[in-house]
Amino acid sequence: MNARATVRTLTTALLVAAATVAGPAATTATGATAGDRTQAGAMEFTEVHVWATGVNVRNHPSGTPAFDQCYTFPSRSNCRVVASVSRATVTAYCQKQGELITDSGYRSRWWTYLESPSGQWGWVNNVYITGDEHLAHVSDCEN
């Protein structure tokens, strides 16, 4: 098993664990709630390009109240910096709305959950990702 497959396996296991703790309405490893699974299908990993340098990747350890708060509303105040990314193509899982960020003439409330080059997973505001405010090729996260 290669490193990317191992990371995906571990990420799926963490998402399943988080959904189990959060209850039946939570997101499953496929990215859909139990009721939506047949309608929405599985979310897939996709690649996005972070165009800026020194972009903070934000998250908290899973299973903590801070993780739940960060997941519910990604923001600078709810999520601590766990890594950074500079001008790189990275793996993304899903996106959701959070704090409005304005930088370099762009603004967005959308945040994408992605894997940093160092292997840390976390949120990056879409202002720093090539594309529109809401990325058409990245699935929306389930609440």
Image (cartoon, rainbow, N blue to C red):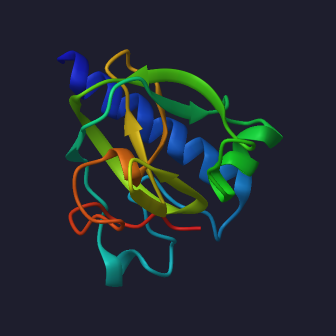
Residue placed at 28% from the left, 64% from the top? Answer: 135
Seen from the viewer's position, the closer of residues 52 and 85 is 52
- Name above or below for residue 10 compared with residue 107: above
Q: Split into 4 quadrants, where in the image is the C terminus?
A: bottom right
- Name above or below for residue 60 compared with residue 31: above
Q: Split into 4 quadrants, where in the image is the N terminus?
A: top left
| Image coords of residue 111 (percent x, y) | 47, 54
Residue placed at 30% from the left, 23% from the top? Answer: 6
Residue placed at 50% from the left, 29% from the top? Answer: 56
Q: How many marks?
A: 0
Left or right of 29 on screen, residue 74: right
| Image coords of residue 85 (percent x, y) | 36, 25
Left or right of 4 on screen, residue 65: right
Q: Quadrant location of residue 49?
A: top left
Seen from the viewer's position, the closer of residues 136 and 119 is 136
| Image coords of residue 8 (percent x, y) | 32, 33
Seen from the viewer's position, the closer of residues 101 and 82 is 101
Q: Residue furthest front?
A: 105
| Image coords of residue 68 (percent x, y) | 72, 48
Seen from the viewer's position, the closer of residues 85 and 141 is 85
Residue placed at 42% from the left, 29% from the top? Answer: 10
Left or right of 137 on screen, residue 81: right
